[in-house]
Amino acid sequence: MDPEITNGILTVVNTSRTLVLTILNNELQRQEERRRQLLLSGEDSDDEMEAEFSITAGPSVLELLLLTGHLLPIECRIWARETSTDWWDRIVLTVWDDSQWLRNFRMRKSTFLELCDMLSPALKRRNTNMRAALTVEKRVAIALWKLATPDSYRSVGNQFGVGKSTVGAAVMQVAKAIVKLLLRKVVTLGNVQVIVDGFAAMGFPNCGGAIDGTHIPILAPEHQGTQYVNRKGYFSMVLQALVDHKGRFTHIHVGWPGRVHDARVFRSTSLFKRLQQGNYFPDQKITVGNVQMPIVILGDPAYPLMPWLMKPYTGSLDSGQELFNYRLSKCRMVVECAFGRLKGRWRSLLTRSDLSQTNVPLAIAACCVLHNLCETKGETFMAGGEAEANHLAAEYEQPET
């Protein structure tokens, strides 16, 4: 290389080095002074929460300094605030009994650990040189806590000793893992004869399930927002579900805008197509009068009357029709109770979700899976939970049929 060019580069590098060192020294002094003021005042700012030290320098200058060996080593500073995990490590995992687990995570510790084992293949992370990865148990616990309460990301993060962005990431990681690994295993039809016998004991013969829809409040979407405004005037997304005689979901469909009618949502589902084709339930018929009656599902007046879907009589009714409506309504109540228990456990569904339009369905589906898991494991629905859920639900009244 030409000596003049080399001398010119060295001159630029030396000048750049002087400027960078001056900037670094000034920034370090400013940060130190700010830390003293914060310590004296006892306050904490949002900027200090995640990162306490950051320097921005032009990449070309830093590259030149590195290439020529003129970049001086600078003492490493703490870049993330130390947070406490004692509450989770030393209290929740070691001290809490089943009633405390039920109250806060909606399931006993044994069920929680079983859930973590099932989700571990999708959630396990490796440690890095920068920091230790969150354990699967802590990641799942953060997600369950956020789904079970209307708490903010900041308050949940403070509870577990992590940043609020970590809470948001954990919720979606766990929700995606639940949908990927457990949805088809947990939300399934199961033993049809047991379901039919269960509804028969409640008063309706040859019934394979009850269907209904419910509205989940959401924030206004960026696009086509008016399509999500339901009849009660708030933005929502529809969850439509078929449940068995015990209120467990056997089929769910979520994602349609709140403005869309239940019947239209139903006709768009794979459930409708399979029922129409006659391959969802076994070909098991009973004789009622002179009619061969297949296994049917029960719906409210919003749904279409089909050979395999029974709905109430309307208008002026005789005694036989009133008795039919009574038995149908009694059996159809299981789906309304299922929605009540779903939202009572996972109360984030009762307030406007701040997730993106594409992530809301994943969170709702994950809650449905968790509902089935809790019901199957016999997890107690805590006393007082329904009253608290009703208080939250009052702000977002369900549209009438």
Image (cartoon, grey):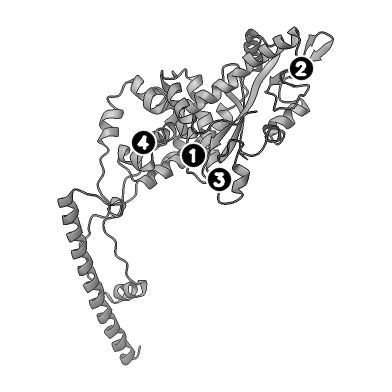
Distance (Cα) linking label 1 and label 4: 25 Å
Residue at left 32%, top 67%?
56
Contact between marks 1 and 4 (CB within 8 A): the answer is no
- Within 10 Å of disc 4 (Cα), the crowding (few <14, some 14-19, many 20+) is some
Q: Quadrant of the C terminus?
A: top right
Please identify the residue farthest to the front as the structure is shown: 316
Contact between marks 2 and 4 (CB within 8 A): the answer is no
Distance (Cα) linking label 1 and label 3: 15 Å
For this view, does 69 lie left or right of residue 259?
A: left
Distance (Cα) linking label 3 and label 2: 37 Å
Distance (Cα) linking label 1 and label 2: 40 Å
SS for tag 1? loop
SS for tag 3? loop
Percent across and percent down for residue 73 are: 22, 67
Residue designated by label 3: 358
Report which quarter residue 269 is drawn in: top right
Residue at left 59%, top 18%?
334
For this view, does 161 lie left or right of residue 332?
A: left
Residue designated by label 1: 352
Name the amino acid type tagged 2.
Pro
Residue designated by label 2: 294
Nearer the observer: mark 2 or 4; the answer is 2
